[in-house]
Amino acid sequence: QVQLVESGGGLVQPGGSLSLSCAVTGNILSSNMMGWYRQAPGKERERVATIFESGEPNYAGSVKGRFTISRDNTKNTVTLQMDSLKPEDTAVYYCYAYLRLSSSGPYDDYWGQGTRVTVSS
């Protein structure tokens, strides 16, 4: 069974840094895209950053220049380095992966369980 296991998160002061990591467990054929989404209280889930298997990243405008996404294709992991954090970055962050499990199967969406990030003094 394929799962996305997240680590990191927690409480940090404004201007501080945090790193989130996510590992895909189980057997997969390929991961076309991996990334991070977040959902703040009372708001819809939004894309934070995604990265293709090629390594090409894409960032939401609100985090560009502050967050850096990277991935290790050999380990099927994706990391989000968050710097210069702001109170408005407070949310539950979800790991996302677009995976294919076998050559005969389709790509499908997979989500982690979420990890909370709180930016507050």
Image: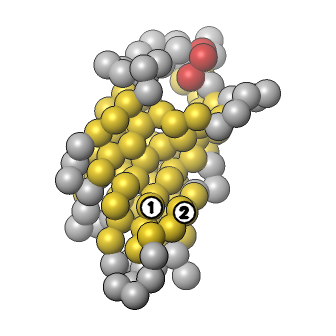
Q: Residue at x 52, y 36 (%)?
A: 47
Label 2 secondary element: strand
Residue position marked by numbered label 2 in the rendering: 110
Label 1 secondary element: strand
From mark 2 to mark 1, how far is it between C-alphas? 6 Å
Q: Is residue 60 above or below residue 36?
A: above
Q: Amino acid at mark 1?
A: Tyr
Q: Residues within 10 Å of mark 2 (few under 14, many from 20)?
A: some
Q: Say which mark, if any, is on residue 112.
A: none
Using the rendered image of the protein, determine whether residue 68 is visible from the camera's viewpoint: yes
Using the rendered image of the protein, determine whether residue 27 is visible from the camera's viewpoint: no
Residue position marked by numbered label 1 in the rendering: 98
Query: Residue 1, percent across and down?
Result: 55, 82
Q: Is residue 90 left or right of residue 108?
A: right
Q: Residues within 10 Å of mark 1 (few under 14, many from 20)?
A: some
Q: Amino acid at mark 2?
A: Tyr
Most foreground residue, 48 or 88? 48
Q: Earlier in the sequence, mark 2 or mark 1?
A: 1
